[in-house]
Image: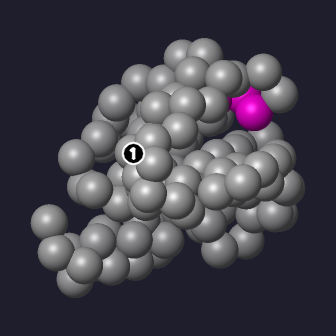
């Protein structure tokens, strides 16, 4: 669970998913310590949720379209976790969510 392990996982995911390199940046919300945005291209989408603070936050789905599968967490312990309707982020946690269902398999 080192920072080196996280960097390797992020680089590997970026190489595997062209959407992280070529997808359009679509802002969803920025509120306090929470930053939420999507990468979209050709009907595929990933949602990136970042809690930049040290306190946990909960996010209700609504317009954020949070249904999907977590591909990577900065804590490296939530891969393949299913998200439906809401998301709880620990302090200083970020996740990449497959909201189109094509990468989780």
- Image quadrant occupied by the N terminus: bottom left
Q: Picture coordinates of residue 66 (x, y %)?
A: 63, 29
Give the residues in magenta. 64-68
Residue for badge 1:
90
Q: How is the image coloured?
A: one colour
Residue 54 or residue 80, whichever sits in front: 54
Residue 42 seen in this snapshot: no
Residue 37 or residue 68, whichever sits in front: 37
Residue 30 seen in this snapshot: yes
User: Mark 1 packing: few (<14 Cα in 10 Å), some, or many (20+)?
Assistant: some
| Residue plotted at (71% across, 44% down) | 44
Residue sitting at the far left: 1
Q: Does the magenta stretch include residue 85?
A: no
Horizontally, is 70 left or right of 18 in the view? left
Q: Is residue 65 magenta?
A: yes
Residue 12 or residue 50, whichever sits in front: 50
| Residue plotted at (57% across, 22% down) | 86
- Image quadrant occupied by the C terminus: top left
Is 65 rendered above or below residue 72?
above
Horizontally, is 102 left or right of 3 in the view? right
Magenta span main SS: loop
Is 3 rendered above or below residue 23?
below
Q: Picture coordinates of residue 51 (x, y %)?
A: 54, 54
| Residue plotted at (48% across, 24% down) | 83
Count every numbered label the image shows and give the total. 1
Figure quadrant of residue 67: top right
Residue 60 or residue 7, whichever sits in front: 60
Figure quadrant of residue 74: bottom left
Label 1: state its secondary structure.
Answer: loop
| Residue plotted at (64% across, 46% down) | 47
């Amino acid at each position: 669970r080192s920072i080196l392990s996280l960097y390797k996982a992020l680089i590997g995911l970026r190489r595997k998913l062209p959407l992280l390199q070529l997808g359009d940046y679509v802002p969803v919300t920025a509120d306090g310590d929470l930053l939420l945005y999507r990468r979209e291209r050709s009907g595929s989408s990933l949602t990136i949720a970042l809690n930049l603070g040290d306190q946990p936050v909960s996010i209700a789905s609504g317009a954020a379209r949070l249904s999907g599968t977590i591909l990577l967490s900065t804590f490296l312990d939530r891969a393949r976790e299913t998200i439906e309707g809401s998301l709880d982020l620990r302090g200083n946690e970020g996740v990449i969510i497959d909201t189109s269902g094509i990468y989780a398999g």
